[in-house]
Amino acid sequence: MKQIWQALKAHQQAVEHRAILDLFADPRRAESFSARFDDMLFDWSKTNIDGTARDLLIDLAAAAGVAARREAMFTGARINETEGRAVLHTALRAMDRPVFVDGLDVTPALRETHARMQAFVRDVHEGRFTGQGGPITDVVNIGIGGSDLGPAMACLALAPYACGPRCHFISNVDGAHATDTLKGLNPATTLVIVASKTFTTIETMTNAETVRRWMAQSVATPAAQFAAVSTAADRTAAFGIDPARVFGFEDWVGGRYSMWGPIGLSLMLAIGPDHFDAFLAGGAAMDRHFRTAPLRENLPVLLALVGIWHNQICGHATRAVLPYDQRLARLPAYLQQLEMESNGKRVAMDGHDLTLDSGPVVWGEPGTNGQHAFYQLIHQGTRTVPCEFLIAREGHEPDLAHQHLLLVANCLAQSEALLRGRSLPEARALMAAKGLTGSDLDRQARHRTFPGNRPSTTLAYPKLTPDMLGRIVALYEHRVFVEGVILGINSYDQWGVELGKELALALQPLLSGDDSAAIKDSSTRQLVAWFRS
Ligand SMILES: O=P(O)(O)OC[C@H]1O[C@](O)(CO)[C@@H](O)[C@@H]1O
């Protein structure tokens, strides 16, 4: 491994100043540096990765043992070593294939829970399960992190497939979130889902109490309109939720990988069981591809290797995710948790400090909106931000096809602009054509140059259907896995969120009056005093 990392670094230094555009002298550049899976196209040719770098990166994945680790994950080995757990979200989307944990096939239980979810959703849709004031019109999902971001992202993404009650999401402990979300909802026709793997998360439990009080003002039995999704049946029972409406899952489903199972209940309510199954089928199709395609043609592996090249080799600390698909507006937030909670770690699996950078900072917004906000920095700032564009060939609005064309044109134009840039002579010619001369021309032209040579990839897909969303989400999940294996990280724990939780619990009583002298640093002491005054 060490030698491959060194060879990659040496190669990167050798080609650092080469223009990506020069790689296109090879007429087969785009074709050779693209991969397809069914009707998805991943084009990574607009990066500075050439044949040598590609070979080294593939060697890196092979030497890191990606294939063996992948098999270990799919077959239920306890690869989440710091928590002693298997990692089996893939089993949630392939329930027909036995998977054993400790010698026990876990899929019959998964199928049973899935069937219970389907029956419940049909009962809601067909009016057999109602609120105390009539058929369910609205669903409020209370959860945070992995118990919120996935379903919230997917409900928006699949809005054209909505066929059930309206779904709303409350996550923040800020009372504003519950207040604003509940405004206008009828408690007597609202179903509340408390979604929490642990059923201890302070934000979720606090919001659940708030919503229960809100409901109690209007209906006789609030608990009758509550359902729960959790691994902790004892705690859901203690909260008073009827076990008939509790959908359990196992601890080998990580929170940020959990939308495929019961945590996806709000999504299933929104789009119906058939579309939800299509979403699962899309994820399963990507699983098969990931498990069987050679590394060189394997989409998750390639996404990961491009990421490693940009982050650990070239030193670009951030990655922008830019979906030219308004309904993927929450994808960047979803990926922030998926990627940063998974690979934002400084201690490797073997207990040693990482000698390389951990996973990148992931951020983004849908295009074209981002173009009118932060693309200025991406085009002309001093730092390089590798960009990942996502774009569908077709939208869901046939009568607005001309707008979709404009969207596609913008997406392709951005990656072209990042690649080509605009040279000083080109900018001078433009300014001269506008009548500028002399020092004025020189100065104005400099502001209008673009360095170009800025890397980007494009993931193109036919249409954002449930199946396609499943493929895209599974693609990113596996990309995170591959990056984690190459970096030697356990992508499935999240100890880094614990300290803040502990300190918040300790600070809460101090804010409401207890002695704050125990606080060690004067800044926190000052802030506590300020809030208390
Ligand atoms: O589903 P739970 O147990 O409420 O946890 C919510 C989220 O909190 C975290 O544990 C981080 O604090 C995430 O990993 C998880 O998705």
Image: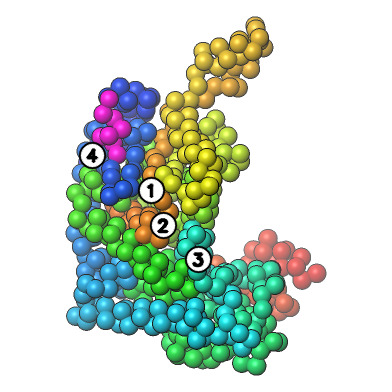
Q: Is residue 512 left or right of residue 49?
A: right
What residue type is disc 2 on? Thr
Task: State the image coordinates of residue 391 (x, y, percent, origin top left).
Answer: 44, 45
Task: Residue at the far top: name it.
Answer: 438
- Residue 185 falls within the magenta-colored stretch: no
Q: Marks 1 and 3, Cα distance to the nearest angstrom?
A: 20 Å
What residue type is disc 1 on? Pro
When asked about the image quadrant of residue 485, the answer is bottom left
- Residue 32 falls within the magenta-colored stretch: yes
Q: Is residue 251 left or right of residue 159?
A: left
What residue is drawn where x is 33% and y is 34%? 45
Task: State the image coordinates of residue 239 (x, y, percent, origin top left).
Answer: 54, 89
The reply to whether the residue tagged 1 has its Cβ within 8 angstroms of ligand 1 is no
Q: Marks 4 and 1, Cα distance to the nearest angstrom?
A: 32 Å
SS of the residue under disc 1: loop
SS of the residue under disc 2: loop
Q: Is residue 1 visible?
A: no
Q: Which residues are magenta?
A: 27-34
Closer to the eye: label 2 or 4:
2
When asked about the image quadrant of residue 517, the answer is bottom right
Using a 10 Å C-alpha cutoff, classify the residue at mark 3 as few (fewer than 14 neighbours), some (14 to 19) or many (20 or more): some
The residue wearing badge 3 is 162
- Residues at marks 4 and 3 touching, judged by CB atoms closer than 8 Å: no
